Amino acid sequence: MPVNRDFSSSPTPFPDDAVLVEQARRGSAAAFGKLVHRYNGNVFGFLLTLARHRQDAEDLTQETFLLAWKKFDRFDPAQPLLPWLLTLARRQSISALRKVRPLPAILPFPAEPEPSVSAPWLWEMARLKLKPDAYSAVWLHYGEELPVRDVATILGKREIAVKVLLHRARKTLAETLRKKTA
């Protein structure tokens, strides 16, 4: 039976996010620390889907929060904070990828932690079978439970493009599952 979920709005932000952002704008390290503590897991989890190494994701997470600290004056407190942070994170990862040379294929990659959501084998299969943009869209929409509108903002795409990405990703994963069970 399909689950009826309303994706028309973002997950409910913490009611004090706007207050904490305003305090951080004025230089409050304590307010900024609360925001980092609150959203560090989300940002790191998203960056881990984009980066090949845990260390890269950790570094990018720190860089994302440093960038947020510098750019809080551009944040609209009427909007939820998480999509804005994830947009910064995505841009940081793109910038980092442009600077780094690809590693030789013979180097082993460290094991990544399993996502905290159910069916980790499904997430691993998705990571291996889907293109990076499609996997990011799937992770943000289903793993982070963000609405399509926010996923589109984070990925820098139109909503319809994200819907197409999600549709194709579900189709690819369904075909892969059918082949494995056949």
Image (cartoon, rainbow, N blue to C red):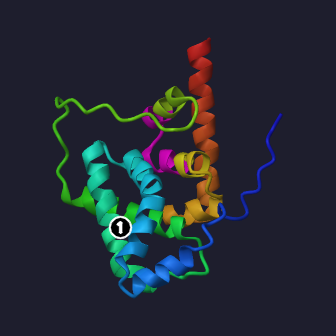
Residue at the image point whose x is 29% and y is 65% from the top? 63
**Residue 91 occupies quadrant:** bottom left
Residue 39 on image: x %, y %: 47, 60
**Residue 30 occupies quadrant:** bottom left
Residue 179 on image: x %, y %: 58, 18
Q: Is residue 132 magenta?
A: yes
Residue at the image point whose x is 39% and y is 68% from the top? 33
Vertical relation: 156 (above or below) 58: below
Give left or right: position of 168 versus 113.
Answer: right
Vertical relation: 118 (above or below) 17: above
Q: Is residue 53 magenta?
A: no
Give left or right: position of 9 versus 36.
Answer: right
Q: Nearer the viewer, residue 30 or 45?
A: 30
Residue at the image point whose x is 49% and y is 44% from the top? 135
Give left or right: position of 38 versus 51.
Answer: right
Residue 64 on image: x %, y %: 34, 65
Quadrant location, the N terminus? top right
Give the prevailing secondary structure in the magenta stretch. helix
Residue 20 on image: x %, y %: 49, 77
Quadrant location, the C terminus? top right
Residue farthest to the top, as pictured:
182
Q: Nearer the viewer, residue 17 or 59?
A: 17
Vertical relation: 66 (above or below) 113: below
- SS for callout 1: helix
Q: Nearer the viewer, residue 62 or 134?
A: 62
Residue placed under numbered mark 1 in the picture: 65
Residue type at numbered disc 1: Phe
Residue extent of the magenta highlight: 126-137
